[in-house]
Structures are given as C-alpha cells and as structure tokens.
Image: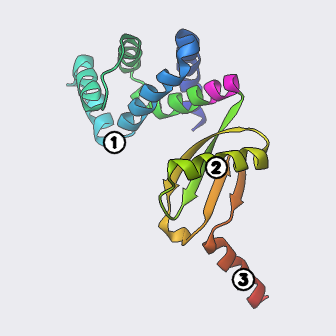
Amino acid sequence: MAEIATIARPYAEALFKAVGSDAASAAVWLDELAVVAANEQLRQFADSPKTQPEQVFALMSGVLKNALPAQAQNFLRTVIDNGRIAALPEIAAQFRALKNAQLGSFDAVVYSAFEVDSASLADLSGVLEKRFGRKLNLHVELQPDLIGGIRVVVGDEVLDTSVKARLEQMKIALTA
C-alpha cells in the first residue's frame, strides 16, 4: 500500500499545482476516473500487451458520465502512458487531501439507515461542524443494518448515534 501511495503522490501534487483554483471541478472528474480505474476487468485489459494506450483511453473516457476537459484528457493520457492506472484511486485520495488542506476542511462519511434529504443534511452539517470543530465535506452512504440514527466518520474519529450501537451498548450492560 505504501508503494501505491508513493507512486500516486507526484501525480496528485502535479495535478493540484496544474489546476490551481479549479481544484473542486478537477476533483469531480478525478473521482470519476478513480471509480473507473478501480474496475479489475479494465485493469486487466490495460495490462494486456496487446492493448494500445489509445484503446485504454477511449474505453475509460467512453464510460464516464461527462466528457473530460482537455486538462483531464492530458492527465489521463499521462497516467495510461506510464502504466499507473492502478494508482488512480490513490491519486484521487491524495488530491482530495491536498484540496481539503487548502480549504481547511475535512471529508466526513455519514452512514445512515435511510436516505437523508438536502435540508436535513444541511442541518446535520452545521451540528457536526460544531461537534468536530472544523469544516466538513459530508458524503452520505446508506447502511440499512444501522436500523436508525447515523454513524459519522471523520478521519479516525467516529460519532455513532445509531440504534445498532445503542443496542450493542445495552447488550454489553446486560451481560456484564
């Protein structure tokens, strides 16, 4: 894992310097590329000696929801030409960390048993930012086994107010 991080760091830093103030839009297309690059079949196709770099580029850019801007196309071609497709998810993670450091914010994952509407998410964002004492970028993931409530992960900090966690606490208290 450290090797992938070492490989990804120069790409993330170079891209961050190249995009400048446009880091937010670059993060969007970079995250899309990272999702595509995480596909095992794509990586096998790209690693085949019979596959040309232009074929890999056409395949990756063809499955994206939005067309890539010129800067993104150049970046993707560089990554493909250097055989670093497997590092794209780590490049995206390191790029996001650089962007967050510049903005003074942190990524937070909110696990919820049910869909969270935008108004509730805005309210929750204010409460969580006050609780954690920093600006947060919330990302919601559904996790039905929580039964109810939410579980928030910010870096290595966890705030678990789910029904599942409370039931576990009750179980421990009753069996102790």
Residue 36 is situated, as x and y percent measured from the top left of the image, at 35, 35
Q: Identify the residue position indicated by label 2 in the image.
A: 123
Q: Identify the residue position indicated by label 3 in the image.
A: 170
Would residue 167 be seen by someone viewing this image from the given angle? yes
Q: Is residue 166 above or below residue 78?
A: below
Query: Which of the marked residues, 3 or 1, is nearer the chain's N terminus?
Result: 1
Q: Identify the residue position indicated by label 1 in the image.
A: 40
Q: Is residue 98 above or below residue 156?
A: above
User: Residue farthest to the front?
Assistant: 119
Q: Mark 2 is on which residue type?
A: Asp
Q: Mark 3 is on which residue type?
A: Met
Q: Which residue does the image show at 70% across and 84% down from the upper left? A: 171
Find residue 15 and name its label: none
**Label 1 packing within 10 angstroms: few (<14), some (14-19), many (20+):** few
Label 3: element kind: helix
Distance Cα–Cα, label 3 vs label 2: 29 Å
Q: Nearer the viewer, mark 3 or mark 2?
A: 2
Query: Which of the marked residues, 3 or 2, is nearer the chain's N terminus?
Result: 2
- For the record, the magenta segment spans 97-103
Distance Cα–Cα, label 2 vs label 1: 39 Å
